[in-house]
Image (cartoon, rainbow, N blue to C red):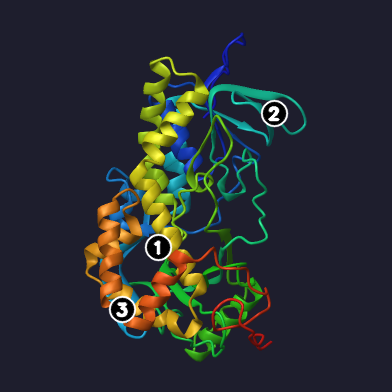
Amino acid sequence: MTRASGTAGPRPVDDVLVVGAGPAGRAVAAACAALGLRTTLLDPAPRRPWRSTYAAWASELPADLPDAVVASRSPGRAVALTEHRLGQDYVVLGTQPLRAHLDEALGRGGARVVAGRAVAIPSPHRVVLDGGGSLTARVVVDAGGHRRPLGTTDWRRPAAAEQTAHGVVVPAEVALPLVGPGEALFMDWRPDHGEDGWPTFLYGVALGDGTVLLEETSLARRPGLALEDLRRRLHARLARHGVAVPDGARVERVRFPVDTPRHDRDGVLGFGAAAPLVHPATGFSVATALVLAPRVAGALAAALAEGDDGADAAARVDRTVLWTPAARAVHALRRRGLEALLRMPARDVPAFFDTFLALPDRHRRAYLGARDDLGATLAAMTALFGRSGWPLRGRLVGPALLPAAPARDPEAGDDRAPGARGRRYRR
């Protein structure tokens, strides 16, 4: 997977330096190397195992993704006020096969993989490493996830809207009361956990090895709902359905922001969750990164071949590939949708999703996946508004006229609008 770093000289050694070796970083580094760009991938622990579950709708994934990378593929189902069959397959990616696929591509392209932590970027071409030393390249890509090691602002913003989840992995036969064979439970908003307060849903997917991940999820909250609250709700829900969690069951914990602003370091190209490519209403980003990585690499190669300075090349690719006018407009609309959800009383959330899930498949797909199709996104939002009752319409339109929803008391179990006084969760 490694190659010689080349000879030092007055110009940067590499064409592209990618900081962050998760799925997004590996994908864009491999795509750059495949085009003959001298590429280095930097990460504090590049061989550290991936422990997250990566999934996407089948239509969102690259057409050339090998079948071996797919751990499971199942028709999607969701429950809000009623049950909905979603008309498309939901894919869980095999964590190790995906990584092996990307590592093979890195090796094939001759990319260099370096263990080290980026701590500063004194110029658009030089990254300083923890413990001394530096790496240089014509273009620097920050693919370090929502922590954005090369960003200018602290990722631990106190008012960030976050998705949080607590899950357990159980044998498929144990999960049968909630997730049937050959299906993916995208979301189940029924309050089977028995608690009032901030709405959460159950997510359940087969992992392809005879096990199922069952996860209590808070789609978005500012700040995120506490993991301990989610753990308690999950176990109460499972107990209600007779699902006994085996001793020693693997646990998965999720916490990341869904309202990260665009990458703000001049001369650095943000990619993946650092861009951010995170869908504000779902938290998905991996499929988008896999699709966009070859386009980003192609645009970088073209810009560098035409003589663009590295910083100019990064800005050009950001403007013409990642954040076209249409993509910026769609992202802004999705952020408005996020704010509507953050301001929505808990009692209205299942009705909102019932209306959304009942939309024609083309509208659901557009809102969930078409990041640069402004017409399709507007059509989906118009259809949702048209099918909503007047109270829900007010909930959808109001946030467009208001500033971002304020942060809630981290302990509050309020099921009304932000700012209203509510009671705490039961402990």
Q: Which mark is residue 208?
A: 1
Classed neighbour count for the residue bearing mark 2: other residues with Cα under 10 Å, few (<14), some (14–19), many (≥20)? some
Give the answer, above or below, for where 237 lies relative to 58.
below
The residue lying furthest to the front in this view is 401
**Label 2 sits on residue:** 128
Q: Which mark is residue 388?
A: 3
Q: Residue at x 27, y 45 (%)?
A: 63
Residue 87 coordinates in the image, percent (x, y): 24, 68
The amino acid type of the residue labelled 3 equals: Ser
Q: Which mark is residue 17?
A: none
Give the answer, above or below, for where 62 lies relative to 392.
above
Dot placed on the residue nearer the N-terminal end, 1 or 2: 2
As measured in the structure, the alpha-carbon distance from the residue carrying label 2 to the one carrying label 3 is 53 Å
Question: In the image, which is nearer the foreground, mark 2 or mark 3?
Answer: 3
The amino acid type of the residue labelled 1 equals: Gly
Classed neighbour count for the residue bearing mark 1: other residues with Cα under 10 Å, few (<14), some (14–19), many (≥20)? some
**Labels 2 & 3 near each other (Cβ < 8 A):** no
